[in-house]
Amino acid sequence: MTNRSNVRIAFINQKGGVGKTTLTLNCAVGWARLGFRVLMVDLDPQAHLTLSLGDSLAEGSLERIEHNTIESALRREKPLTECIFEVAGEGVSLVPSHIDLSGAEGELSQELGRELLLRDALETLGDRFDLVLLDCPPSLGLLSLNALAAADEVVVPVQAEYLALQGMAQLMKVITLVQQRLHPGLQWNAVVPTMVDPRTRLSREVVEELRRHFPDQVTRTLIPSRVKVAEAPSFGVSIFGHDPNGPAAGEIEDLCQELVERLSLTLAERDIVI
Ligand SMILES: Nc1ncnc2c1ncn2[C@@H]1O[C@H](COP(=O)(O)OP(=O)(O)O)[C@@H](O)[C@H]1O
Ligand SMILES: [Mg+2]
């Protein structure tokens, strides 16, 4: 296994409601519990990740959060390092989003080098984090292209539902274009079936179909549909904050462990202070 730190992982699928934001938060906390220093970046103008954590970020005042977002960093109004907020009780950090990001996307699309704005901003983090998780919006616009151009790895959550594969061909095409034109090092090693209901035949068939199409990418670990997972954001916490001993937390732990192997993630060697 090669030694990797500062690995950036884009959680991407242009479909909305497939579990990107939920998986980003739960994997972030799951990896933090394994010892990784994790930063999440909310790249969705709908700011679901930011809103779901709202109160847990309140140590920075709400006003400060509004003025120190990923938008401010992409516009180069603020250094990214000033837009990082600790998520209380979860051991992870977040760069928040704001609805204004949708306007910024239009304006930034006029800029030279517009696909590389996020990559440049992330370069300023040095080795402060081991993993940077990019929660993408439900589109393949400029923000998602920035995520792909900045990422080392792509994780595609796919809801185990009717028409699950719809849109995958287009996503693959965009990933290939980014590899060819912007970022040859971009790896695509994980498709994660989400909201799986093993009791239904449809759900099982969708997972089988995914495995047929993407035999090397589909994870062994499936993420079932669980009420506790859906509830957690309303409490402003991950599944580990909501139901640490339930089955859903165990499933996220399994997925985090599998992705450590699949993406060859290793902890950076650091001096251990006792
Ligand atoms: N494993 C799961 N079990 C139950 N509900 C889930 C699960 N994952 C996500 N959800 C719910 O599905 C909806 C969409 O999830 P979300 O993560 O916001 O998707 P996306 O970011 O792709 O739009 C949310 O209401 C969320 O609470
Ligand atoms: Mg989302």
Image: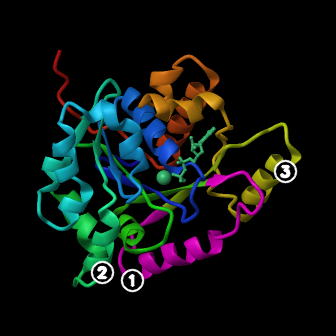
Residue depth check, mark 3 versus mark 2: number of the one nearer the observer: 2
In the rendered structure, the answer to whether residue 250 lies left or right of residue 39 reads right
Residue 165, image quadrant: bottom right
In the rendered structure, the answer to whether residue 17 lies left or right of residue 101 reads right
Task: Identify residue type, mark 2.
Answer: Ser
The local crowd at label 3, few if under 14, some if 14 to 19, many if 20 or more residues have their Cα within 10 Å, is some
Query: Which of disc 2 and disc 1 is earlier in sequence?
Result: 2
Q: How far apart are marks 3 and 2 (CA)?
A: 40 Å
The local crowd at label 1, few if under 14, some if 14 to 19, many if 20 or more residues have their Cα within 10 Å, is few
In the rendered structure, the answer to whether residue 15 lies left or right of residue 28 reads right
| Highlighted magenta segment, given as a residue range | 158-187
Question: Going 58% across and 35% down the picture, which residue do you hit?
Answer: 230
Determine whether the beta carbon of the residue marked 1 sits less than 8 angstroms from the nearest atom of ligand 1: no
Residue depth check, mark 1 versus mark 2: number of the one nearer the observer: 2
Residue 248: image x %, image y %? 60, 28
Task: Identify residue type, mark 3.
Answer: Leu
Residue 11: image x %, image y %? 47, 55
Q: In this view, does 109 lie above or below 194?
A: below
Query: Which of disc 1 and disc 3 is earlier in sequence?
Result: 1
Question: Going 54% across and 20% down the picture, which residue do you hit?
Answer: 243
In the rendered structure, the answer to whether residue 32 lies left or right of residue 26 reads left
Query: Which residue in the protein does label 2 denote?
Result: 109
Question: Going 69% across and 69% down the picture, which residue do you hit?
Answer: 166
Q: Of the numbered discs in the image, which one, if any, rests on residue 152?
A: none
Query: Which residue in the protein does label 1 denote?
Result: 181
Task: Identify residue type, mark 1.
Answer: Arg
User: Count the marks: how many?
Assistant: 3
Given residues 44 and 3, the one toward you in this image is 44
Q: Of the numbered discs in the image, which one, if any, rests on residue 202?
A: 3
